[in-house]
Image (tube, rainbow, N blue to C red):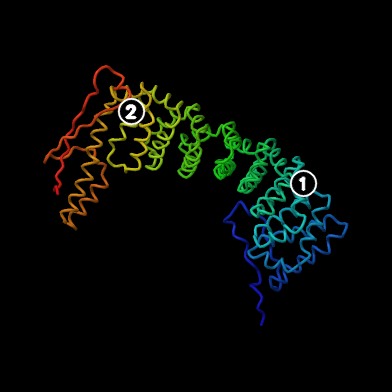
Amino acid sequence: MSISPRPFSPPRSASNEEDIIDDDEYIESPGTLISSFDLYKNAVDRLRSSVTCQSIEQQQTSLEHFKPLSTRTNAWLYMRVHDDLFSILLDYLLIENLSIQSVVLSIFANIACEQASHEQIIETNLIDIVCRKTVDISQIDITNRCFRLLGNVCTVEDAARKMIEADLTRSMGNVLRQCTDAACLHSTIRCSRKLSIYAFGRDRMLDSMCLLWICKQLFAEKVALRKEAMKAVLEWDIDGSDRSRSQLREGEIFRFLITTIEGKSDKEYRHIALRLMNNLLRHSDMRTEFGLRNGLDFLLNMIHNHHYQSTYEHLKCIGLLCVCCQEANNRRLIKDDMNKLQIFFDYLEKYQYRSNFLDLLLTAIGQFMYDDQALLIFVKQMQFIERMCDLLESVVMTKYEINEKRLLGDDEQDSREAKKLKTQHSVGRISQSKYYTVALRADYNLLQSTTEPPEIFTIDFGLSYSKR
């Protein structure tokens, strides 16, 4: 009894469209079914016999017959038993015929989808040959298939180093700068995205200004191309490289992000844009650039017009505005606009938000404490001291009332009430009971510089815990 696999393997799943793009289908000829091993053996034998013949048409036919087999599930399982398959395909690749080269590159790209094939690919000179073919960017179809193949295999570090040594990034920069074909640009950006996981790859791509030209494709007409460019920028490590951030700024990254989020595009797309903006604003130079690009006005507008936003998006915009306060230039822009300043105090009174969000707001307000003009606005126009006293009162009362109930030992009933107190931001007034008077001094540089003694504000906290 034969133990061969099923007679015909099903086509490889197209769930990952970036790895398999070819739409060719293998048409089964009528007749007796044969095992998959025999099917591949016959196809390889046909390739072997045609490679040395002088008929281009025969060679083309043999390759076209084999190509759909390379897209099938477990194709490498059946192909790897033929030790000379790669050498045969490499011989085809050296034939001076663009149609034949195009088909061979597609076959290799399909084979490279299987990680198990990468070791054998690296052992050959395939990567060097393909990198040399990318130099001539006038042949759009060949260039597209070359970068598709390289993108499938460059996840292996040894393969990536071979590409860098072959000066692939120079050709990559030329394609990104000059090419107008969407498919070719997509394959090139995808390859650059996978190559950017290595520091040595990023450095060489920055030399060729690849990141800058990827940013230019963020404004492309094709949605798929824009999304691929966004993924490439999102996955690019900018933490240790001023050059990376410089090319992002030159590529008008913030103009793209602001336009994308304001454009009410699909939810997933906006969330990716917000995530990217969050990553960028972790850096001082990017926060300053964001303020100069009217980013603060954008955030203010998003906060005020939040009807079509999710809670995540709304809170993210407020959080980003708080983060921007770390830069002196942004604080000046915020200080000059009362609406921006008012945002911080308005949301201090939003009871539904948790303490980590209040930490952001208080930290942002604290950035202005050494600015006499801003402090004067806070005290005179924003009722800063009164608001802080109210906030302190509610926080202290929440803490002591929870502790009191724990000490009294009312386990089940009081634990439920304590949980309710935790989930509320207790800004409201506390019911009257026993009162203790606490003096809070507003000891600021601004108040100290006046001739009058600092004013003392007293507030009453309703505390009712047992003294011991």
Using the numbered discs, state the Cα–Cα distance from disc 2 to disc 1 in whole angstroms: 60 Å
212 up-or-down from 11: above or below: above
Q: Residue at x 21, y 54 (%)?
A: 415
Residue 136: % across, % down: 77, 41
Q: Residues within 10 Å of mark 2 (few under 14, many from 20)?
A: some
Left or right of residue 248, residue 312 in this image: left
Q: Are marks 2 and 1 in contact (CB under 8 Å)?
A: no
192 up-or-down from 53: above or below: above
Residue type marked 2: Gln
Q: Residue furthest right?
A: 54
Q: Residues within 10 Å of mark 1 (few under 14, many from 20)?
A: some
Q: What secondary structure is found at the residue carrying circle 1?
A: helix
122 up-or-down from 446: above or below: below
Residue nearer the viewer, 53 or 370: 370
Left or right of residue 2, residue 397 in this image: left
Residue 257: % across, % down: 51, 35
Residue 446: % across, % down: 32, 22
Q: Tell me the quadrant of the picture where the N terminus can be found.
A: bottom right
Quadrant of residue 123 within the rendered picture = bottom right
How many marks on residues?
Answer: 2
Residue 370: % across, % down: 38, 26
410 up-or-down from 430: above or below: below
Q: Residue at x 18, y 37 (%)?
A: 429
Residue nearer the viewer, 224 or 420: 420
Residue at numbered disc 1: 133
Residue at numbered disc 2: 342
Q: Residue at x 69, y 73 (%)?
A: 35
Residue type marked 1: Lys
